[in-house]
Amino acid sequence: MKENKIKTIRKREGNIVAFDESKITSAILKAGIATKEFDFEKAKKLSEKVVDVLNQMYGNDNDVVKV
């Protein structure tokens, strides 16, 4: 797993919080369980890919990533 460059995010309400990859994993896992398509291991791999893409898109910004 590569180093995550994203340290903070700005939530819809405007709050700035620490970036937490486990929240992405959890959301993906819930979808996998609901559809009975995949388990935690697959959800973890998918969330790592999501974080890789986010790092490519926003990892060089000095600003807070907005979600």
Image (cartoon, rainbow, N blue to C red):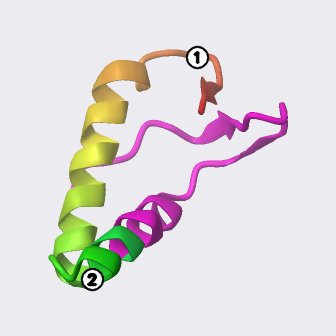
Quadrant holding the N terminus: bottom left
Under mark 1, the amino acid is Asn
Q: What's drawn in magenta, residue-wise?
A: 1-29
Q: Residues within 10 Å of mark 2 (few under 14, many from 20)?
A: some
**Is residue 24 in the magenta section?**
yes
Could you say where residue 2 lies in the image, as x and y percent from the top left?
24, 49
At 84% across and 39% down in the image, what residue appears? 15
Give the left or right position of residue 7, taking residue 33 as reference.
Answer: right
Q: What is the quadrant of residue 35 in the picture?
A: bottom left
Number of numbered callouts drawn: 2
Secondary structure category for the residue under label 1: loop
Secondary structure category for the residue under label 2: helix
Q: What is the quadrant of residue 11 in the picture?
A: top right
Q: Which one is closest to the eye, mark 2 or mark 1?
A: 2
User: Is 66 drawn above or below residue 15 in the view shown?
Assistant: above
Could you say where residue 67 lies in the image, as x and y percent from the top left?
59, 33
**Is residue 46 in the magenta section?**
no
Q: What is the quadrant of residue 25 in the picture?
A: bottom left
Which sits in the foreground, 50 or 56?
50
Under mark 2, the amino acid is Phe
Q: Which residue is mark 1?
A: 62
Could you say where residue 62 lies in the image, as x and y percent from the top left?
58, 16
Q: Give the number of the disc on residue 2.
A: none
Could you say where residue 61 lies in the image, as x and y percent from the top left?
50, 15
Q: Which residue is mark 2?
A: 40
At 74% across and 34% down in the image, what residue appears? 12
User: Is 43 drawn above or below residue 11 in the view shown?
Assistant: below
